[in-house]
Image: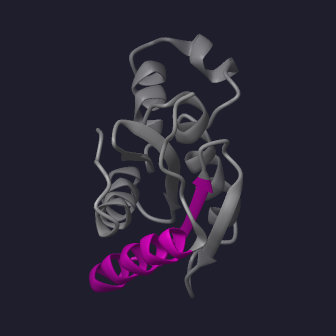
Amino acid sequence: MKTKPMLELVDAQIIVHAAQTFATSKGWPVTIAVCDDGGNLMLLQRMDGAAAMSATVAPGKAQTCATTLRPSKHYEDMVNNGRAAALRLPCLPIEGGEMIVVDGHCIGAVGVSGVKPGEDAEIARAGVAAIGAQITF
């Protein structure tokens, strides 16, 4: 039987704190979501000034990464490159979701929503880096 690392609440709290600190330094009001490897929401934080819809979009980005083992940008690129069938997948094809990879295992994901998609991804990667996880993009 194989064993793998697991994301714990304290890890999610560190991720959110680091992501929020980075977003605040840029003046970007966002919502940050962290989910486990099954796409289950562990922590959600909506910063003051973040759009209400971002509280729905951020978890969707995180769930996309955790359950498909790809950054959400992968699916946005598919759609932008003409693969409209990707819109029928049960995922959110918008950049801003990043996997949390430890020892080669995806243990969860971070989704950020509220600014430009590339900026959302920057914030998510800042959170992932805070726990020393691998950043994939």
Vertical arrangement, residue 80 with respect to residue 6, above or below:
above
The residue shown at (33%, 51%) is 118
Front-most of 85 and 136? Answer: 136
Q: Main secondary structure of the magenta part?
A: helix
Residue 103 in which image quadrant: top left
Q: Position of residue 125 (x, y in %)?
A: 32, 58
The residue shown at (45%, 12%) is 82
Residue 57 in which image quadrant: bottom right
The residue shown at (44%, 81%) is 17
Please say whether residue 115 is one of the residues in the magenta stretch. Answer: no
**What span is colored magenta in the figure?**
10-35
Please say whether residue 29 is one of the residues in the magenta stretch. Answer: yes
Q: Position of residue 105 (x, y in %)?
A: 43, 38
The residue shown at (44%, 50%) is 96
Vertical arrangement, residue 67 with respect to residue 46, above or below:
above
Front-most of 21 and 24? Answer: 21
